[in-house]
Image (cartoon, rainbow, N blue to C red):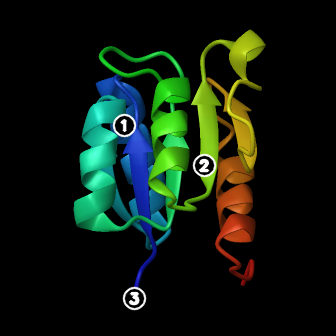
Amino acid sequence: MAHTILIVDDDPDIVAYLEDVFTDEGYRTVSARNGKQALAAIESERPDAITLDLEMPDMTGPKFNRALEKSGRDIPIVVITGHPGLKYVIPGARAVFDKPIDRLALLAALRDILGQDDN
């Protein structure tokens, strides 16, 4: 069964790009426009990993992360941000990428996080 990646970002162009990158590699994707939608998606979709933007309306990435920690769920997070100075505000993030995103590095990090071979 394919791993599911939850894409949390309010920019539809970034979401579309990440969906293409991940589905081309055989991953299943689910998206959310903010942290509130992401928390709901976690309950219904049970993602294996999350890509998380930091600056979003309604619930920012850091607020989402705190809510996720309180829920007791341990889902690896990859931060994807257009604000490099904020990249360390998610303690425990497994990887951090600035926008524009290095596709190959992102996929390599995701494979490592999910325990997949490069083959």
Q: Secondary structure at mark 2?
A: strand
Residue at image point 70% right, 15% down: 86
Q: Earlier in the sequence, mark 1 or mark 3?
A: 3
Whether residue 107 sits left or right of residue 21 in the image: it is right
Distance (Cα) linking label 1 and label 3: 22 Å
Q: Amino acid at mark 3?
A: Met
Quarter the C terminus occupies: bottom right
Q: Amino acid at mark 2?
A: Ile
Mark 3: give few (<14), some (14-19) or many (20+) Cα within 10 Å. few
Mark 1: give few (<14), some (14-19) or many (20+) Cα within 10 Å. many
Which residue is labeled 1 in the image?
15
Residue at image point 44% right, 73% down: 26
- Residue 104 on image: x %, y %: 70, 52
What's the mark number on residue 1? 3
Badge nearest the viewer, 2 or 1? 2
- Residue 70 on image: x %, y %: 50, 46
- Residue 116 on image: x %, y %: 68, 80
Q: Can you tell which quarter of the image residue 32 is in?
A: top left
Q: Earlier in the sequence, mark 2 or mark 3?
A: 3
What's the mark number on residue 50? none
- Residue 16 on image: x %, y %: 33, 39
Which sits in the foreground, 55 or 12?
55
Which residue is labeled 2 in the image?
77
Distance (Cα) linking label 2 and label 1: 16 Å
Badge nearest the viewer, 2 or 3? 2
Whether residue 115 sits left or right of residue 73 in the image: it is right
Whether residue 6 sits left or right of residue 90 in the image: it is left
Q: Earlier in the sequence, mark 2 or mark 1?
A: 1
Q: Amino acid at mark 1?
A: Val
Which sits in the foreground, 106 or 87?
87
Quarter the N terminus occupies: bottom left
